[in-house]
Image (cartoon, rainbow, N blue to C red):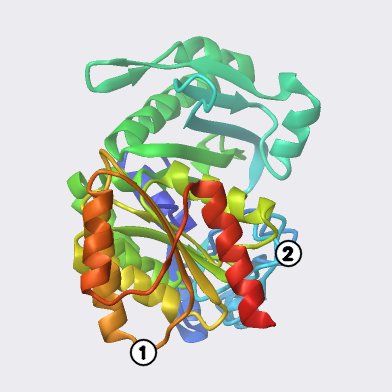
């Protein structure tokens, strides 16, 4: 779960990381009222979308008084931003962050994430924070320093003192940076994050450190023990309602641009299924990962989402019943969905593993018409052929 900037800053502030004073607003009048309450000499009005590179797309604006804040909010709210990170899918702006403009001397970069190659936790730090740090780091490996971190009981520890001295030469700033590093490590562990990033971490004209922007990604699988973070989903303005509803039904769902609905148990298997469809000349209408905790009624809801998408011309069910969902539970969910929804499209099913044979009995008892696939690749070819036949 990616947090909006204002959510991420609120989380980091709770762990002692300094942030500019600010408020989130969803209307022009609300933005003006926030500015008047804050009473700053200068303001920044920032579009709240789940993507970076907002400044280059006009999503970050500066104002000197509440009237200018209102004008900036009026120019942003209700519009759609296209940034390098959104790709061709524009992100709608339903909220803005109105905050104090900090006069800066320098911009740093600080992040904690999980190394995808080793599975270890690392801190990334740079004295050259701000825009395009990913691009700069890709051409110059010395731009970002890597610090290995490890768990010491409930704490995440590392050589923060040496790391701080590498990117801050002034002793007082380096000491403050060590504190921010430790607090960021505490936030990372305390919120079950997979990414906690501050870019930029600024040094103000007064010599203080502030997180001017923040990005935090929470592990969805840990939300059951973090109810205070799970509630943040309710604040996710602009989030796809189908995706949020699917989450409540124990399904990870993302709508795509293709014509073949995909029902899969397991994220890795789902990604493989998408690749197989592309190789066969087709394209997926969605990503779907059915969690182990999903019931047949939850699964029926997932099938309903797919059938409600008019772009879907066929459904490919690729299920391996093992430690994941049993095949018969998914078959039962399909039967329930087809009793609720009148729309019909060709269904291709590849069932393997736990209760695969029984699942076929469940499908027959529910009167579900489908084409059986021998293996995953065969299923992808059959699904693509079904779409082409429908289009003919």
Give percent across and percent down for residue 258. Answer: 61, 68
Of the residues under marks 2 and 1, which one precedes in the sequence? 2
SS at mark 1? loop
Task: Say which residue appears at 22% left-offset and 62% top-offset.
Answer: 361
Q: Are marks 2 and 1 in contact (CB under 8 Å)?
A: no
Q: Is residue 221 above or below residue 181?
A: below
Give percent across and percent down for residue 359. Answer: 25, 58
Asked if one can make out residue 249 in the rendered structure from this viewpoint, the answer is no
Disc 2 marks which residue?
57
SS at mark 2? loop
- Quarter of the image where the C terminus is located: bottom right
Which of the two residues, 151 or 295, is positioned nearer the viewer here?
A: 295
Disc 1 marks which residue?
342
Which of the two residues, 71 or 233, is positioned nearer the viewer here?
A: 233
Which of the two residues, 115 or 173, is positioned nearer the viewer here?
A: 115
Tell me the distance, in whole angstroms, between the alpha carbons under discs 2 and 1: 43 Å
Which of the 4 quarters of the picture holds residue 134? Answer: top right
Give percent across and percent down for residue 228. Answer: 22, 53
Task: Say which residue appears at 57% left-offset and 79% top-offset.
Answer: 311
Task: Say which residue appears at 56% left-offset and 74% top-offset.
Answer: 93
Judge left or right: residue 83 versus residue 193: right
- Within 10 Å of the Cα at label 2, are there few (<14), some (14-19), or many (20+) other Cα atoms? few
Q: Nearer the viewer, mark 2 or mark 1?
A: 1
Residue sitting at the far bottom: 342
- Within 10 Å of the Cα at label 1, are there few (<14), some (14-19), or many (20+) other Cα atoms? few
Q: Is residue 222 above or below residue 123?
A: below
Asked if one can make out residue 120 in the rendered structure from this viewpoint, the answer is yes
Q: Is residue 188 above or below residue 346?
A: above
Q: Is residue 3 above or below residue 68?
A: above
């Amino acid at each position: 779960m990616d947090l909006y900037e204002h959510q991420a800053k609120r989380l980091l502030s709770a762990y002692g990381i300094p942030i500019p004073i600010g408020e989130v607003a969803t209307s022009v009048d609300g933005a003006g009222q926030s500015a008047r309450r804050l009473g700053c000499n200068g303001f920044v009005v920032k579009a709240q979308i789940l993507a970076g590179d907002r400044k280059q797309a006009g999503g970050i604006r500066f104002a000197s008084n509440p009237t200018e804040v209102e004008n900036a909010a009026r120019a942003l709210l209700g519009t759609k931003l296209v940034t390098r990170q959104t790709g061709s899918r524009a992100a709608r702006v339903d909220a803005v962050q109105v905050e104090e403009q900090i006069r800066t001397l320098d911009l740093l970069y600080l992040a904690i994430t999980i190394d995808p190659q080793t599975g270890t936790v690392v801190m990334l730090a740079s004295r050259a924070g701000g825009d395009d740090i990913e691009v700069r780091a890709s051409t110059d490996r010395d731009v970002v320093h890597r610090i290995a971190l490890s768990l010491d009981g409930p704490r995440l520890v590392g050589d923060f003192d040496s790391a701080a001295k590498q990117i801050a030469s002034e002793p007082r700033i380096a000491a403050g940076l060590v504190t921010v590093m430790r607090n960021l490590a505490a936030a990372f562990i305390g919120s079950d994050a997979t990414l906690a990033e501050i870019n930029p971490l600024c040094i103000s004209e007064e010599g203080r450190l502030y997180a001017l922007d923040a990005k935090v990604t929470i592990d969805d699988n840990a939300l059951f023990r973090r109810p205070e973070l799970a509630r943040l989903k309710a604040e996710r303005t602009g989030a796809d309602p189908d995706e949020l509803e699917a989450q409540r039904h124990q399904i990870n769902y993302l709508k795509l641009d293709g014509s073949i609905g995909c029902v899969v148990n397991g994220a890795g298997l789902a990604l493989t299924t998408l690749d197989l469809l592309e190789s066969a000349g087709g394209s997926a209408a969605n990503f779907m990962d059915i969690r182990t905790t999903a019931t047949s009624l939850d699964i029926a809801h997932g099938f309903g989402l797919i059938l409600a998408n008019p772009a879907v011309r066929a459904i490919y069910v690729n299920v391996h019943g093992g430690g994941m969902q049993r095949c018969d539970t998914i078959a039962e969910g399909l039967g329930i969905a087809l009793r609720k929804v009148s729309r019909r499209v060709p269904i291709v099913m590849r069932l393997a593993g736990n209760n695969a044979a029984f699942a076929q009995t469940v499908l027959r008892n529910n009167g579900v018409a489908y084409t059986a696939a021998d293996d995953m690749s065969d299923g992808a070819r059959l699904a693509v052929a079904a779409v082409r036949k429908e289009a003919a």
